[in-house]
Image (spheres, rainbow, N blue to C red):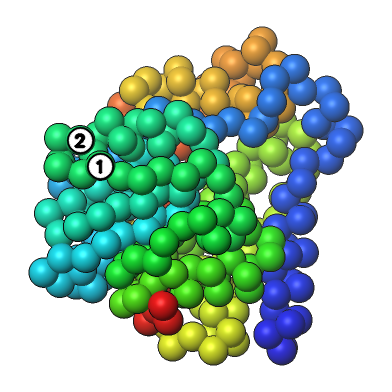
Amino acid sequence: MSTTEQLRAWAEDLAAWRIPESILSGAVESPWVLPDEVFARRTESYLAAPCGPSYERAMEALGHGGSVLDVGAGAGAASLPLASRVTGLTAVDSHQPLLDDLVRRAAPLGLAPVVVCGTWPDAAASVPVADVVLCHHVIYNVADLAPFVAALTGHARRRVVTEVTVRHPLTDLNPYWKQFHGLDRPEGPTAEQVVEILEGLGLAVKVERWTRPAMAEYDSFATLVDVTRRRLCLPPDRRDDVAVALLNAGVAEDRPPDLGSSGRELVTIWWQGEA
């Protein structure tokens, strides 16, 4: 398959995740839940105990110090743990409250980030280049992958470090869509496709697959239930049904994970920048 065909297949795989209008039109709340709590708790956890290949590859590229551009920064889970070697930080995200949280968390670490509320690569022209560019858990949201990746590469002097789940994170919800709506959801795209596309675009990528330890991404099981219910386009009176379904699937009440944001089976991909 040519790179053009791979890119087309990627876009088609992502388009297949659209919720059918027959279900979406009946939803009383938006299913597009942005779990700020999850991003905040994730950042706190990673600051307390930074680890994993994505962190290690970024620290390696920073060496004795360097600037960082964090694309899809959220609350800073990818970039703030690097603070001891960061000489300057620029953070791009489409959700201003998360950027505000990042700035608040950065201050005690001695950082004063420049934040840009916008999408990538639209914001790329107004963002300076950096020694290391980070992009964690964003790529599955990008239908037009070639210009997105080109802008990442063109903004990195030393290295681009990305992190993705092994498969599209929304696949965690597939059994529940089947149970509550009788709907079969897609299984792709996958990290393997990401790597193939990057190589097809001429990048000499390196790849490491790994598993992140489980953590409580919500402060309560009830919050997980409510977010999952909304994501499934179910009304509030189905809350108990969703709780039972999650428990029957083995979801831990004491460590409620976020279903549909990121997972534990991860892939770190990195390549040389061209800035």
**Residue 142 at what x, y percent from top left?**
63, 58
Quarter occupied by residue 250: top left
- Residue 112 is marked as 1
Asked if residue 24 shows in the view, the reply is: yes
Q: Is residue 85 left or right of residue 135?
A: left
Report if the CB atoms under discs 2 and 1 are less than 8 Å apart: yes
> At 39% from the left edge and 49% from the top edge, which residue is drawn?
91
> At 63% from the left edge and 25% from the top edge, which residue is drawn?
230
| Picture mark count | 2
Q: Nearer the viewer, residue 16 or 137?
A: 137
Up the image or down, 162 lies above or below 47; here it is: below
Tag 2: residue type?
Answer: Ala
Tag 1: residue type?
Answer: Ala
- Residue 107 is marked as 2
**Residue 157 at what x, y percent from top left?**
34, 76
**Residue 252 at what x, y percent from top left?**
37, 32
Element at label 2? helix
